[in-house]
Image (cartoon, rainbow, N blue to C red):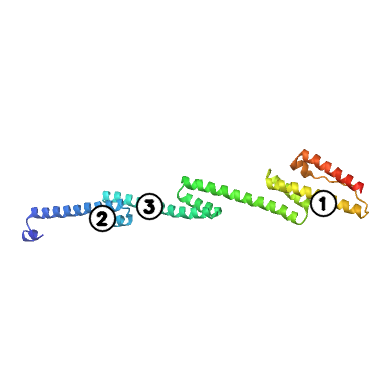
Amino acid sequence: MKLQQEFPKEDEIGRLLDTAREDQVEHEKKQKLAAARDLLAAQRFADALALLDSLLAIDAEDSAVLKLRTLAQREQETQAKSETLQHEWQILKQLVAEKDYATVVSRAENLLRQFPGEADLVRLVEFARNQQAQMANDLRLRSARDQVQEFFQANRFGEAAAAARSGLESFPGDADLTTLLKQAQARQKKEMVRQLIERRIRGEKSPPFHYFDKGNLATIGRGAAVAGAVLHFAAFAYVGDQ
């Protein structure tokens, strides 16, 4: 600059100075681009973007800067999504541990809208739904067993047997309900025989002894039905002898 002031008519000096300035700008740009690449490598995307924006303020059409900035922005978005997914996974794991499967399904389905096709999320939703169904099934089974037990405690054995049969229609082969049904039928028969004996002792006219429980045929089998008939006959004979 000083030379240009001293020799204003020397065009060559002006051209040299312009070239020097351009070289300096280019050198600074290369340094900043290198620094931006280092920031990208360190995953400091916000800092890299700020540096690249300062270069675009000088030349908004610089293709090299624009290309690097696009890459930085894409990597920043990928990192943000990855952090979001990682954070959500921690929450989902806690919810699974707490067996809050309804919330697991809801949160995981929301995440699938952001990360469509994410295999682990798809598997988690399927697992949570299966667990939900299993828990609902277990609750229904417990409710059926509890109802039978309540009838037992109230000595309402006929209703206990009916409730057990109803439960077995929904849960065929359940060992607890099958045992409860057998117990209810046995107690019901015993109670009916006791009542007949007491009426006979009191000299009251006893009605014909009839006991037919379709549960024997429907649930326990033909052998049990035959055994039940033998028991009925024996009880009737016993009462008649008194």
142 relative position to 183: left or right: left
Residue under label 1, please give it.
191
Secondary-structure class at tag 3: helix
Secondary-structure class at tag 2: helix
138 relative position to 218: left or right: left
Which of pointers 1 and 3 lies earlier in the amino acid sequence?
Answer: 3
Q: Amino acid at mark 3?
A: Gln
Q: Amino acid at mark 1?
A: Glu
Residue under label 3, please give it.
79
Please rate how many residues cluster around mark 1, counting C-alpha atoms within 10 Å: few if below 14, some from 14 to 19, many from 20: some
At x 40% / y 51%, what residue is drawn? Answer: 82
Residues 85 and 3: in front is 85
Work out which quarter of the rendered image holds the N terminus and state it: bottom left
* Contact between labelled residues 3 and 1, with CB atoms less than 8 Å apart: no
Q: Is residue 4 among the parts visible in the rendering?
A: yes
At x 27% / y 57%, what residue is drawn? Answer: 54
Residues 51 and 4: in front is 51
Residue under label 2, please give it.
55
Seen as rendered, the residue at the extreme top is 222
Q: CA distance from mark 3 to mark 2?
A: 24 Å
